Image: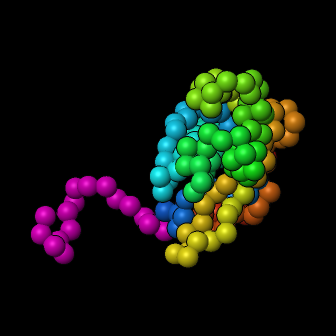
Amino acid sequence: MAKGKQSSKGHAVDFDNVPDDNTYPRGSYHAKLKAWEPGEYEEKFTVNLEYELLKPKAFKGAPFFTRFFLGTDDDPEAKQPETQRRSRDFIKLKKVLASLGVKLKGTIEDICESGVGEEEILQIGKGKPRADGSVFNNIVKAFAVGERDPEITEEEEEGSASGGKKKPLKA
């Protein structure tokens, strides 16, 4: 199609309905761990988790991805006990895996794999804006199902990924 010409075929879009970012509002979400994979960031070991949000209803089926930065400059593979003991992300990953109800013995690979298909409540927050202005969600805490009800605690803003609702959402 030539530049500047309009076609009667194609997909109509109203970008006023498209969010300005892809973050979720702060709150507690009932989530199922769909997959995990080991990864690397700046040549350091990471664990990446992929969830499917189940509740609140407004977010049912939505994906949520998170990454735990486990390797360090001194221990890129994160295999040293001291690295594991002092790492904030190891501590957070331990809590996330424990709330899934998995046994925390064995290799990180086996432990993460045993959590696939399990459910938990994730308290999701937002990190500090980066230099480019982008903001990402993060896991603040994790709870076993039944320890906390899923609910949005932050009023959603116009242009957010959740559609700009202005009241707290319950499951």
Q: Quadrant of residue 56?
A: top right
Q: Closer to the camera, 167 or 59?
A: 59
- Place of residue 128 in the rendered image (x, y in percent of width and height, measured from the top left): 67, 69
Residue 83 higher or lower than 4, as above or below: above
Q: Quadrant of residue 130?
A: bottom right
Q: Is residue 33 magenta?
A: no
Residue located at (47% from left, 52% from top)? 43
Looking at the rendering, in which quadrant would you find the N terminus? bottom left
Q: Closer to the camera, 73 or 2?
A: 73
- Place of residue 105 in the rendered image (x, y in percent of width and height, measured from the top left): 72, 24
Looking at the rendering, in which quadrant would you find the C terminus? top right
Residue located at (22% from left, 55% from top)? 9
- Place of residue 152 in the rendered image (x, y in percent of width and height, measured from the top left): 76, 53
User: What's the magenta region?
Assistant: 1-17
The secondary structure making up most of the magenta span is loop
| Left or right, 124 with reference to 73 | right
Residue 41 shows in this picture: yes
